[in-house]
Amino acid sequence: MKQYLTGLALAASLAGTASLAHADVDAGKTAYDSGNYKAALKEFSPDAAKGVANAQNYLGIMYEKGQGVPVDYQKALAWYRKAAEQGFAPAQTSVGYFYEEGKGLSRDFAEAMKWYRKAAEQRDAQAQNNIGAMYEQGRGVPADPVQAAEWYHKAADQGLPAGQANLGFLYARGKGVARDDAMAVSLYRKAAEKNFAMAQNNLGFMMAEGRGVEKDYSAAAAWYLRAAEQGSGLARLNLSRLYEQGKGVPQDNAQAFAWLKKAAEGGHVPAMRRLADVYSRGLLGQQPSSELAKQWSAKAS
Protein backbone atom coordinates (compact mmCIF):
# COMPACT_ATOMS: atom_id res chain seq x y z
CA MET A 1 0.00 0.00 0.00
CA LYS A 2 2.69 2.53 0.94
CA GLN A 3 4.17 2.47 -2.54
CA TYR A 4 0.92 3.93 -3.89
CA LEU A 5 -0.50 6.24 -1.25
CA THR A 6 0.41 9.91 -1.31
CA GLY A 7 -2.43 10.94 1.01
CA LEU A 8 -5.23 9.48 3.07
CA ALA A 9 -7.85 10.56 0.52
CA LEU A 10 -6.50 7.99 -1.93
CA ALA A 11 -6.71 5.03 0.41
CA ALA A 12 -10.22 3.86 -0.46
CA SER A 13 -9.86 4.22 -4.22
CA LEU A 14 -6.52 2.36 -4.35
CA ALA A 15 -7.31 -0.48 -1.97
CA GLY A 16 -8.30 -2.82 -4.80
CA THR A 17 -5.34 -1.80 -6.93
CA ALA A 18 -2.91 -2.45 -4.12
CA SER A 19 -4.24 -5.93 -3.44
CA LEU A 20 -4.08 -6.78 -7.14
CA ALA A 21 -0.49 -5.57 -7.25
CA HIS A 22 0.47 -7.88 -4.40
CA ALA A 23 -1.35 -10.71 -6.14
CA ASP A 24 0.66 -10.01 -9.32
CA VAL A 25 3.94 -10.10 -7.39
CA ASP A 26 2.95 -13.41 -5.83
CA ALA A 27 2.06 -14.79 -9.26
CA GLY A 28 5.36 -13.51 -10.60
CA LYS A 29 7.28 -15.16 -7.77
CA THR A 30 5.49 -18.46 -8.41
CA ALA A 31 6.40 -18.28 -12.08
CA TYR A 32 9.98 -17.23 -11.27
CA ASP A 33 10.52 -20.05 -8.78
CA SER A 34 9.29 -22.57 -11.36
CA GLY A 35 11.70 -21.19 -13.98
CA ASN A 36 8.96 -19.69 -16.15
CA TYR A 37 10.78 -16.39 -16.61
CA LYS A 38 8.60 -15.18 -19.49
CA ALA A 39 5.51 -15.35 -17.28
CA ALA A 40 7.41 -13.87 -14.34
CA LEU A 41 8.47 -10.90 -16.45
CA LYS A 42 4.87 -10.35 -17.53
CA GLU A 43 3.68 -10.38 -13.91
CA PHE A 44 6.46 -8.26 -12.41
CA SER A 45 6.67 -5.53 -15.05
CA PRO A 46 3.37 -3.67 -14.42
CA ASP A 47 3.90 -3.60 -10.66
CA ALA A 48 7.53 -2.55 -11.04
CA ALA A 49 6.38 0.36 -13.21
CA LYS A 50 3.91 1.34 -10.47
CA GLY A 51 6.69 1.40 -7.87
CA VAL A 52 6.36 -1.95 -6.10
CA ALA A 53 9.85 -2.46 -4.69
CA ASN A 54 9.75 -6.25 -4.58
CA ALA A 55 8.77 -6.42 -8.26
CA GLN A 56 11.50 -3.92 -9.14
CA ASN A 57 14.04 -6.03 -7.30
CA TYR A 58 12.99 -9.15 -9.18
CA LEU A 59 13.43 -7.36 -12.50
CA GLY A 60 16.90 -6.35 -11.36
CA ILE A 61 17.72 -9.99 -10.67
CA MET A 62 16.37 -11.11 -14.02
CA TYR A 63 18.36 -8.53 -15.99
CA GLU A 64 21.48 -9.29 -13.97
CA LYS A 65 21.23 -13.03 -14.57
CA GLY A 66 19.72 -12.97 -18.04
CA GLN A 67 16.56 -14.78 -16.96
CA GLY A 68 13.91 -14.32 -19.65
CA VAL A 69 15.77 -11.24 -20.92
CA PRO A 70 19.30 -10.59 -22.22
CA VAL A 71 21.87 -9.83 -19.54
CA ASP A 72 21.89 -6.06 -19.10
CA TYR A 73 23.72 -4.72 -16.05
CA GLN A 74 22.59 -1.15 -16.63
CA LYS A 75 18.92 -2.12 -16.67
CA ALA A 76 19.48 -4.40 -13.69
CA LEU A 77 21.08 -1.57 -11.76
CA ALA A 78 18.31 0.84 -12.72
CA TRP A 79 15.67 -1.50 -11.29
CA TYR A 80 17.71 -2.31 -8.20
CA ARG A 81 18.20 1.39 -7.58
CA LYS A 82 14.46 2.12 -7.81
CA ALA A 83 13.79 -0.50 -5.14
CA ALA A 84 16.82 0.52 -3.07
CA GLU A 85 15.74 4.13 -2.94
CA GLN A 86 12.50 2.94 -1.36
CA GLY A 87 14.52 1.28 1.39
CA PHE A 88 14.25 -2.30 0.09
CA ALA A 89 17.26 -3.93 1.76
CA PRO A 90 18.04 -6.75 -0.73
CA ALA A 91 18.09 -4.19 -3.55
CA GLN A 92 20.36 -1.90 -1.52
CA THR A 93 22.77 -4.79 -1.15
CA SER A 94 22.65 -5.42 -4.90
CA VAL A 95 23.35 -1.76 -5.69
CA GLY A 96 26.31 -1.95 -3.33
CA TYR A 97 27.55 -5.08 -5.08
CA PHE A 98 27.29 -3.43 -8.49
CA TYR A 99 29.41 -0.54 -7.23
CA GLU A 100 31.90 -2.89 -5.62
CA GLU A 101 32.35 -4.98 -8.77
CA GLY A 102 31.89 -2.20 -11.32
CA LYS A 103 28.93 -3.87 -13.04
CA GLY A 104 27.19 -1.42 -15.35
CA LEU A 105 29.07 1.55 -13.89
CA SER A 106 32.51 2.57 -12.62
CA ARG A 107 33.75 0.72 -9.55
CA ASP A 108 33.33 2.79 -6.41
CA PHE A 109 34.07 1.16 -3.06
CA ALA A 110 32.81 4.13 -1.06
CA GLU A 111 29.42 3.95 -2.77
CA ALA A 112 29.38 0.20 -2.32
CA MET A 113 29.95 0.56 1.41
CA LYS A 114 27.28 3.25 1.65
CA TRP A 115 24.63 0.99 0.17
CA TYR A 116 25.79 -2.05 2.13
CA ARG A 117 25.46 -0.08 5.35
CA LYS A 118 21.93 1.01 4.48
CA ALA A 119 20.94 -2.63 4.06
CA ALA A 120 22.96 -3.80 7.06
CA GLU A 121 21.09 -1.34 9.25
CA GLN A 122 18.00 -3.37 8.35
CA ARG A 123 19.83 -6.56 9.34
CA ASP A 124 20.30 -7.77 5.78
CA ALA A 125 22.67 -10.69 6.28
CA GLN A 126 24.21 -10.54 2.80
CA ALA A 127 25.06 -6.87 3.30
CA GLN A 128 26.63 -7.65 6.67
CA ASN A 129 28.73 -10.36 5.05
CA ASN A 130 29.80 -8.05 2.23
CA ILE A 131 30.88 -5.35 4.69
CA GLY A 132 32.95 -8.02 6.41
CA ALA A 133 34.62 -8.84 3.11
CA MET A 134 35.34 -5.16 2.44
CA TYR A 135 37.10 -4.92 5.80
CA GLU A 136 38.93 -8.20 5.36
CA GLN A 137 40.24 -7.23 1.93
CA GLY A 138 40.71 -3.52 2.61
CA ARG A 139 38.40 -2.44 -0.20
CA GLY A 140 37.54 1.23 0.29
CA VAL A 141 38.42 0.99 3.98
CA PRO A 142 41.64 0.13 5.82
CA ALA A 143 41.98 -3.64 6.15
CA ASP A 144 40.68 -4.57 9.59
CA PRO A 145 40.27 -8.28 10.38
CA VAL A 146 38.62 -7.52 13.72
CA GLN A 147 35.90 -5.50 12.00
CA ALA A 148 35.64 -8.20 9.35
CA ALA A 149 35.08 -10.84 12.01
CA GLU A 150 32.42 -8.74 13.71
CA TRP A 151 30.46 -8.27 10.51
CA TYR A 152 30.82 -11.89 9.44
CA HIS A 153 29.56 -12.84 12.91
CA LYS A 154 26.41 -10.78 12.39
CA ALA A 155 25.73 -12.55 9.09
CA ALA A 156 26.63 -15.98 10.49
CA ASP A 157 24.30 -15.51 13.45
CA GLN A 158 21.48 -15.06 10.96
CA GLY A 159 22.38 -18.35 9.30
CA LEU A 160 23.93 -16.97 6.11
CA PRO A 161 26.21 -19.72 4.74
CA ALA A 162 28.69 -17.21 3.27
CA GLY A 163 28.98 -15.47 6.63
CA GLN A 164 29.50 -18.77 8.41
CA ALA A 165 32.15 -19.89 5.92
CA ASN A 166 33.98 -16.56 5.98
CA LEU A 167 33.98 -16.42 9.76
CA GLY A 168 35.20 -20.00 9.83
CA PHE A 169 38.10 -19.02 7.59
CA LEU A 170 39.11 -16.25 10.01
CA TYR A 171 39.05 -18.72 12.91
CA ALA A 172 41.12 -21.19 10.90
CA ARG A 173 43.70 -18.49 10.18
CA GLY A 174 43.53 -16.63 13.47
CA LYS A 175 42.69 -13.37 11.70
CA GLY A 176 40.75 -10.87 13.79
CA VAL A 177 39.95 -13.65 16.27
CA ALA A 178 42.02 -16.14 18.22
CA ARG A 179 42.77 -19.19 16.09
CA ASP A 180 40.27 -21.94 16.88
CA ASP A 181 40.19 -24.89 14.51
CA ALA A 182 37.25 -26.51 16.27
CA MET A 183 35.20 -23.34 15.86
CA ALA A 184 36.26 -23.14 12.20
CA VAL A 185 35.10 -26.72 11.64
CA SER A 186 31.79 -26.02 13.36
CA LEU A 187 31.13 -22.98 11.20
CA TYR A 188 32.23 -24.71 8.01
CA ARG A 189 29.95 -27.64 8.79
CA LYS A 190 26.92 -25.39 9.28
CA ALA A 191 27.46 -23.79 5.90
CA ALA A 192 28.45 -27.05 4.21
CA GLU A 193 25.24 -28.71 5.31
CA LYS A 194 23.40 -25.90 3.50
CA ASN A 195 25.25 -26.96 0.35
CA PHE A 196 27.63 -23.99 0.30
CA ALA A 197 30.50 -25.18 -1.89
CA MET A 198 33.31 -23.10 -0.36
CA ALA A 199 32.48 -24.40 3.10
CA GLN A 200 32.30 -27.98 1.82
CA ASN A 201 35.78 -27.66 0.36
CA ASN A 202 37.17 -26.03 3.49
CA LEU A 203 35.59 -28.64 5.74
CA GLY A 204 37.17 -31.31 3.56
CA PHE A 205 40.53 -29.59 3.96
CA MET A 206 40.23 -29.51 7.76
CA MET A 207 39.38 -33.22 7.78
CA ALA A 208 42.27 -34.08 5.46
CA GLU A 209 44.66 -32.14 7.70
CA GLY A 210 43.15 -33.29 10.99
CA ARG A 211 42.60 -29.72 12.15
CA GLY A 212 39.84 -29.27 14.71
CA VAL A 213 38.61 -32.74 13.89
CA GLU A 214 40.07 -36.24 13.64
CA LYS A 215 41.91 -36.79 10.36
CA ASP A 216 39.62 -38.60 7.94
CA TYR A 217 40.53 -38.72 4.26
CA SER A 218 37.36 -40.58 3.30
CA ALA A 219 35.17 -37.88 4.81
CA ALA A 220 37.39 -35.22 3.23
CA ALA A 221 36.93 -36.83 -0.18
CA ALA A 222 33.17 -36.91 0.29
CA TRP A 223 33.04 -33.18 1.08
CA TYR A 224 35.41 -32.34 -1.76
CA LEU A 225 33.16 -34.30 -4.11
CA ARG A 226 30.06 -32.36 -3.05
CA ALA A 227 31.83 -29.07 -3.68
CA ALA A 228 33.42 -30.32 -6.91
CA GLU A 229 30.04 -31.31 -8.31
CA GLN A 230 28.94 -27.71 -7.78
CA GLY A 231 31.85 -26.48 -9.87
CA SER A 232 34.40 -25.53 -7.20
CA GLY A 233 37.78 -25.52 -8.92
CA LEU A 234 39.67 -25.78 -5.65
CA ALA A 235 37.60 -28.78 -4.54
CA ARG A 236 38.18 -30.45 -7.89
CA LEU A 237 41.92 -29.92 -7.52
CA ASN A 238 41.88 -31.25 -3.96
CA LEU A 239 39.87 -34.31 -5.00
CA SER A 240 42.31 -34.90 -7.83
CA ARG A 241 45.16 -34.95 -5.34
CA LEU A 242 43.41 -37.51 -3.14
CA TYR A 243 42.90 -39.81 -6.14
CA GLU A 244 46.53 -39.33 -7.15
CA GLN A 245 47.72 -40.20 -3.65
CA GLY A 246 45.11 -42.88 -2.93
CA LYS A 247 44.00 -41.16 0.28
CA GLY A 248 40.37 -41.75 1.27
CA VAL A 249 39.69 -43.12 -2.23
CA PRO A 250 41.36 -45.84 -4.31
CA GLN A 251 44.47 -44.63 -6.09
CA ASP A 252 43.30 -43.82 -9.59
CA ASN A 253 45.31 -41.72 -12.04
CA ALA A 254 42.44 -41.56 -14.51
CA GLN A 255 40.12 -40.04 -11.89
CA ALA A 256 42.89 -37.75 -10.70
CA PHE A 257 43.43 -36.48 -14.23
CA ALA A 258 39.69 -36.13 -14.94
CA TRP A 259 39.09 -33.94 -11.88
CA LEU A 260 42.24 -31.94 -12.52
CA LYS A 261 41.17 -31.25 -16.10
CA LYS A 262 37.68 -30.19 -14.96
CA ALA A 263 39.23 -27.76 -12.51
CA ALA A 264 41.54 -26.32 -15.17
CA GLU A 265 38.80 -26.06 -17.78
CA GLY A 266 36.66 -24.28 -15.20
CA GLY A 267 39.28 -21.54 -14.94
CA HIS A 268 41.04 -22.53 -11.70
CA VAL A 269 44.56 -21.14 -12.19
CA PRO A 270 46.48 -23.48 -9.81
CA ALA A 271 44.83 -26.42 -11.62
CA MET A 272 45.96 -24.97 -14.95
CA ARG A 273 49.53 -24.83 -13.68
CA ARG A 274 49.31 -28.38 -12.37
CA LEU A 275 47.88 -29.60 -15.67
CA ALA A 276 50.72 -27.92 -17.54
CA ASP A 277 53.15 -29.80 -15.30
CA VAL A 278 51.29 -33.07 -15.89
CA TYR A 279 51.60 -32.69 -19.66
CA SER A 280 55.20 -31.51 -19.41
CA ARG A 281 56.32 -34.50 -17.32
CA GLY A 282 53.88 -37.13 -18.56
CA LEU A 283 52.19 -37.67 -15.21
CA LEU A 284 48.85 -39.28 -14.28
CA GLY A 285 49.05 -41.67 -17.22
CA GLN A 286 49.32 -38.90 -19.82
CA GLN A 287 51.78 -38.85 -22.69
CA PRO A 288 54.23 -35.95 -22.44
CA SER A 289 53.17 -33.04 -24.64
CA SER A 290 55.22 -29.87 -24.71
CA GLU A 291 52.54 -28.21 -26.85
CA LEU A 292 49.72 -28.86 -24.35
CA ALA A 293 52.01 -27.92 -21.49
CA LYS A 294 52.71 -24.57 -23.16
CA GLN A 295 49.02 -23.97 -23.84
CA TRP A 296 47.98 -24.54 -20.22
CA SER A 297 50.94 -22.60 -18.89
CA ALA A 298 49.95 -19.66 -21.08
CA LYS A 299 46.34 -19.85 -19.88
CA ALA A 300 47.50 -19.89 -16.27
CA SER A 301 49.55 -16.75 -16.77
Image (spheres, rainbow, N blue to C red):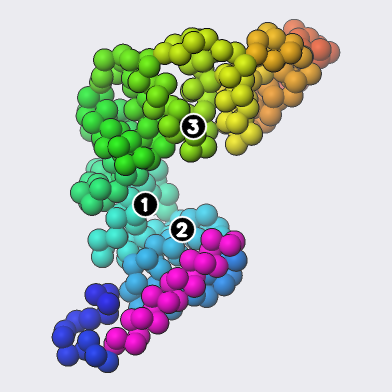
Rendered position, 102 above or below 248 = below
Instruction: Tell me the amino acid under the disc marked 2.
Output: Ile
- Residue at (49% x, 60% y) in the render: 63
Q: Is residue 249 magenta?
A: no
Tell me: 130 left or right of 42. left
Q: Nearer the viewer, residue 252 or 219?
A: 219
Q: Are marks 2 and 1 in contact (CB under 8 Å)?
A: yes
Of callouts 3 and 1, the N-terminal one: 1
Q: Quadrant of the C terminus?
A: top right
Residue extent of the magenta highlight: 14-35
Q: Is residue 273 visible?
A: no
Instruction: Tell me the amino acid under the disc marked 1.
Output: Ser
Please tell me whether mark 1 sits on a helix, a strand or a loop.
Answer: helix
Q: Nearer the viewer, mark 3 or mark 1?
A: 3
Q: Nearer the viewer, residue 205 or 75?
A: 205
Rendered position, 230 above or below 277 = below
Q: Quadrant of the N terminus?
A: bottom left
